[in-house]
Amino acid sequence: MKVLFVLTSHDKLGDTGEKTGFWIEEFAAPYYNLLDKGVELTVATPKGGKAPIDPNSEGEDAQTEDTKRFYKDQAAQKVINNTVKLETLNAEEFDAVFYPGGHGPLWDLAEDKTSIALIEAFNKQDKPIGFVCHAPAALKNVKNENGEPLVKGKKVTGFTNTEEEAVQLTEVVPFLVEDMLKENGGIYSKSGDWEVHVLKDGNLITGQNPASSNKASEILYESLK
């Protein structure tokens, strides 16, 4: 089995002067979950090279067994420092794709034409497509084969408006994941803030927040068997 991970290349948190990127836990938990099951993993970003880590995801309260493993894992760090350029890949080479979150995707993956085309290709081939937390932002401009938003009429979740308020970035982000999914016709639902909530509708898998990343990858793996 081959699974493609797509991370953000964007590291600026709006006009705050602060850094952003991908959320370590949302990468590490699915990465090790699949790696330990013998899945062959490729990690790509729009720009290739080093994927930026959100500094907030490196705080003590954000650490898990998987993130601690990542910090000790030279091979995984090498993967993050040398990601493949997204435009060099195509959906035919993989069995599924998984998008970890962090705030970065709101700026680049939401608008990235290569990423949009890639998700559309995976969907057309009816392969599992997984997104967690802010990563459903990458679905903003993705269309289904009828030219309508991919999420239209599908059960979806993603980082909630109340969770965004809790991290005090409602006014900083270019759009709110929950609002966008609803505006695109998604049947949006959520659990309590920071609780595990993952939905699968056809080949589309979405998780609400960092706590949902492991379960989202579990469901992705089950979809591949």
Image (cartoon, helix red, strand yellow):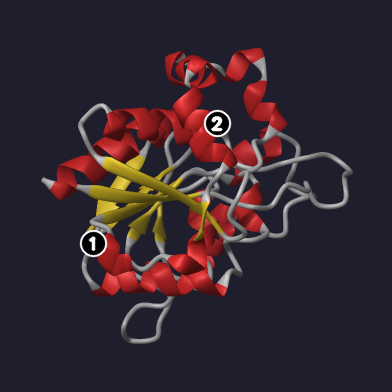
The residue drawn where x is 64% and y is 13% is 60
Residue corresponding to mark 1: 127
Q: Please tell me which residue lies in front, 17 or 71.
A: 71
Which residue is found at the position 16% from the left and 49% from the top? Answer: 224
User: With respect to residue 18, does 153 lie above or below?
Assistant: below
Above or below for 3 versus 115: above
Quadrant where the image shows the C terminus: top left
Q: Residue furthest bottom?
A: 146
Number of other residues with Cα within 10 Å of mark 2, as a class: few under 14, some 14 to 19, many 20 or more: many
The residue depicted at 33 percent of the width and 73 percent of the height is 121
Where residue 79 appears, as percent x and y from the top left, is 49, 38
Residue 97, x across and y down, in percent? 34, 54
**Mark earlier in primary sequence (2, 1):** 2
Asked if residue 219 lies left or right of residue 180, the reply is left
Residue 7 percent location from the top left of the image: 53, 49
Numbered tag placed on residue 24 in the rendering: 2
Please tell me whether residue 43 is drawn above or below residue 211 in the rendered image.
below
User: What is the number of the mark on residue 156?
Assistant: none
Q: Is residue 8 visible?
A: yes
> In what element is the residue under mark 1?
loop
Picture quadrant where residue 91 is located: bottom left
Amino acid, disc 1 = Lys
User: In this rendering, would 48 be left or right of 118?
Assistant: right
Q: Residue at x 62, y 59 (%)?
A: 47
Q: What separation in Å lies between label 2 and label 1 (alpha carbons)? A: 25 Å
Residue kind at label 2, given as amino acid type: Ile
Q: Nearest the camera: 190 or 24? A: 24
Q: Is residue 192 visible?
A: no
Label 2, secondary structure: give it: helix
